[in-house]
Image: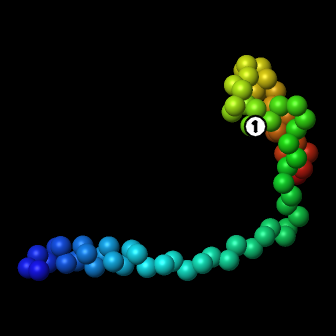
Amino acid sequence: MDNNFLQNFIQMRAGLRREEPVVNHRSVKNGARPMPEPHGITLQTIIEDLPDKKTVLEYFRQRIKEFDEDE
């Protein structure tokens, strides 16, 4: 090939195909625990059922309250 740009481009693309090293994700051990879903409405029901604004705001107020209590 006579085109230097094309050769560099092909080499760059070949370098992108290399496998990236596997990252070992450690689990969190600092006392963090998943938040329990509140009773009644859940994030899934908000997404799927599209309830009214009052219901959605109440859900988020409850979640904020739970986060504040956890600290």
Q: Is residue 49 visible?
A: yes
**Residue 18 place in picture, x, y as percent:** 43, 79
Figure quadrant of residue 37: top right
Figure quadrant of residue 40: top right
Looking at the image, which residue is at 85% across and 60% down? 32
Q: Give the color scheme: rainbow, by chain, secondary structure or one colour.
A: rainbow
Amino acid carrying label 1: it is: Leu
Q: Residue furthest left?
A: 2
**Residue 31 place in picture, x, y as percent:** 88, 64
Looking at the image, which residue is at 40% across and 75% down? 17
Label 1 sits on a secondary structure element that is helix
Considering only vertical position in the picture, is 53 above or below 38?
above
Q: How many marks?
A: 1
Q: Around disc 1, counting alpha carbons within 10 Å, would you say few (fewer than 14), some (14 to 19), or many (20 or more)?
A: few
**Residue 5 place in picture, x, y as percent:** 16, 73
Residue tagged by mark 1?
Answer: 43
Looking at the image, which residue is at 69% across and 31% down? 48
Figure quadrant of residue 9: bottom left
Looking at the image, which residue is at 75% across and 73% down? 26
Considering only vertical position in the picture, is 13 above or below 64?
below
**Residue 62 place in picture, x, y as percent:** 85, 34
For the N terminus, the quadrant is bottom left
Q: Nearer the viewer, residue 37 or 64?
A: 37
Q: Is residue 61 visible?
A: no
Q: Is residue 44 left or right of residue 37?
A: left
